[in-house]
Image: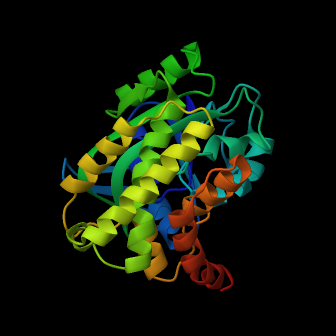
Amino acid sequence: MNILIYGIGGVGGYFGGKLATTDHHVSFYGRGSHLKAIQENGLQVKSFEGDFKVYPDIATNSLEDIPTPDLVLLGVKSWQLEEAALAIKPFLKETTAVLPLQNGADNHGKLLKCLSEEQVLAGLCNLISYIESPGVICHFAIHPTLTFGEIDNEKSDRVSAINAVFNEAGIVSFIADDIHREIWKKFMFIATISAIGGLTRVPIGVIRSSPYLYKKMEEIANEILHVAQAKQMNLTVKDVENVFKTIDKLDPQSTASTQRDIMEGKPSELENFNGYIVKEGARLNVATPVNEFIYECLKPMETKSRSK
């Protein structure tokens, strides 16, 4: 199988690195010093589960260099998805499967704006990793998993074939019975902690210790639940409870990646997280006052970060 890893940061670098340990043809698309280091010295993955180093078949900043892919893993941020889809579109075949792994509730919808339904899968991953230095990915917490499926949840031959490739690479992967439910469960968790973390700029342990802030997190999650239900997603109050079981177990010093981006003055997932809930809430006539407050408070900083 010809596999393209488009974006080789924490997510693309880790899963792309695992796939590059197989006999499948793996191409990396990236930019800057990180790409140059991989071209010269390969990709080093430092993992608490065991370090490894790989040399992809191709590492390039030109899509013209790659063979036509059967599978594309998108490792860019969710707000970069439409740009990525437009870039790869001329190099795909009708049967190429494009799999987004970003946090967010509507990533496959972004892809469908310029790719066909036959080309787009839906997915998510659980992974904590980042670029430690050019050519080096650091995976430092939780056992990685990848969950994906067809947009209509069909158990197709192609998702079975892709799942077999993931397993061959040592990636723990699952074909979801309801991929949209799985995406929204993850989205509820990450949007809840990212929002309050971005505004308070403190670790989750500090937020949990404040009854007021904890209650605000509950309100954020419940607003997300109400929007999801208005969109006919199969989420319930039990899913909110499970989100908080996870939040309660987080290391007290944990911060979300979107929170860190906001604190560092970088473009973040704000629009695709709380901004998305606010806009969908308005469209569906679902009140989202807490998400709206946090979104509007953070929006000026987000606008400034994108003007640089």
Viewer-side residue, 169 vs 101: 101
Viewer-side residue, 20 vs 230: 230
Q: Is residue 158 above or below residue 285?
A: above
Task: Please name the residue shown 21% across and 55% down the image.
Answer: 248
Q: Quadrant of the C terminus?
A: bottom right
Task: Please name the residue shown 73% across and 51% down the image.
Answer: 283
Task: Please name the residue shown 55% across and 78% down the image.
Answer: 298
Q: Is residue 112 above or below residue 165?
A: below
Q: Count numbered badges in the picture.
A: 0
List x then y, in percent, for residue 33: 51, 73
The answer to which image quadrant residue 92 occupies is: top right
Is residue 64 in view from this perspective? no
Viewer-side residue, 192 vs 45: 192
Viewer-side residue, 65 vs 172: 172
Is residue 182 in view from this perspective? yes
List x then y, in percent, for residue 240: 37, 44
Q: Is residue 202 above or below residue 85?
A: below
The answer to which image quadrant residue 144 occupies is: top left
Task: Please name the residue shown 58% across and 46% down the image.
Answer: 227
Position of 283 with respect to 121 (left or right) is right
The answer to which image quadrant residue 208 occupies is: bottom left
